[in-house]
Image (cartoon, grey):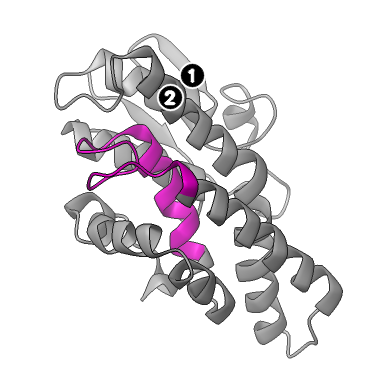
Amino acid sequence: MRPQLFGASYSVYLRIARLALLEKGVDFDHQEVDIFAEGGPPADYLRLQPFGRIPAFIHGDFTLYETGAITRYIDEAFSGPALQPTGPKARARMNQIISLADSYLYRPLVWGIYVARDDAAKNSAALDQAAFDEAVTKSRQSLTALADLCGDGLWLLGEALSLADLHLAPMIAYGRVADEGSTLLREQPCLSAWWDRMTARASMTATRFGAEG
């Protein structure tokens, strides 16, 4: 049975799940759910995800939410290239990178830089410069920490693509739309080179959003 993925195409976290499905070669159905629509998420979606966040996922009679749980399930439930290392140290490093991106990078880079800059432009309004500068500082700290964890190979963990790459890439995609985010990425040569390799992947091309260019 084809799995079903629910969420808005603009979402970083929906894109992470889509990337995992595409990299595994899994055929799936996607249903748009805009949690920011007037009136909030539809009632039937809240039965899948009681907190009203995205994405949610159904495979047969199995329902799942939380992106990390979804992507790990996708990797383990379907055939295709493995997206998680088997060794305990490499697996721990993957989980560390994912946690770092979620906890320290997503909010300042995506919301603090990209969304703040985009909203100001759309509304012809001034930035909250103090908040914006803080977001730049926090993003730089997080990207520096991620660069310090980069392996020597093509991907974040070495020679094999992993869920760490798929988790980080959609955040970088939004952040670098803003000039400040693009500058922050260029400050980290290993991440900048990694990003060039990521954007060449078919899964990234298939999930591009409008502002990405």
Q: Is residue 88 left or right of residue 2?
A: right
Kindly indicate the quadrant of the structure image that contains residue 46: top right
> Which residue is at a point 38% across and 65% down the rendered structure image?
189
Secondary structure of the residue carrying numbered label 2: helix
| Residue 182 at least partly seen | yes
Residue 203 pos. (x, y %): 23, 50
Residue 162 pos. (x, y %): 30, 34
Query: Split into 4 quadrants, where in the image is the N terminus?
Result: top left
> Which residue is at a point 38% across and 9% down the rendered structure image?
61
Secondary structure of the residue carrying numbered label 1: strand
Number of the front mark, 1 or 2: 2
Q: Amino acid at mark 2?
A: Ile
Choose the circle earlier in sequence order: 1 or 2. Answer: 1
Query: Split into 4 quadrants, where in the image is the C terminus?
Result: bottom left
Residue at the far bottom in the pictured view: 124
Q: Is residue 60 left or right of residue 47?
A: left
Segment colored magenta: 148-174
| Residue 31 at least partly seen | no
Residue at the far top in the pictured view: 61
Q: Which mark is residue 117?
A: none
> Which residue is at a point 71% across and 55% down the rendered structure image?
38
> Which residue is at a point 46% across and 59% down the rendered structure image?
172
Give how far apart the Cα atoms at labels 1 and 2 are. 6 Å
Asked whether residue 154 is drawn in magenta, I would say yes
Residue that mark 1 sits on: 64
Kindly indicate the quadrant of the structure image that contains residue 50: top right
Residue 59 pos. (x, y %): 34, 17
- 59 or 148, nearer to the observer: 148
Q: Which mark is residue 70?
A: 2
Tag 1–tag 2 contact (CB < 8 Å): yes
Q: Amino acid at mark 1?
A: Leu
- Number of labels in the image equals 2
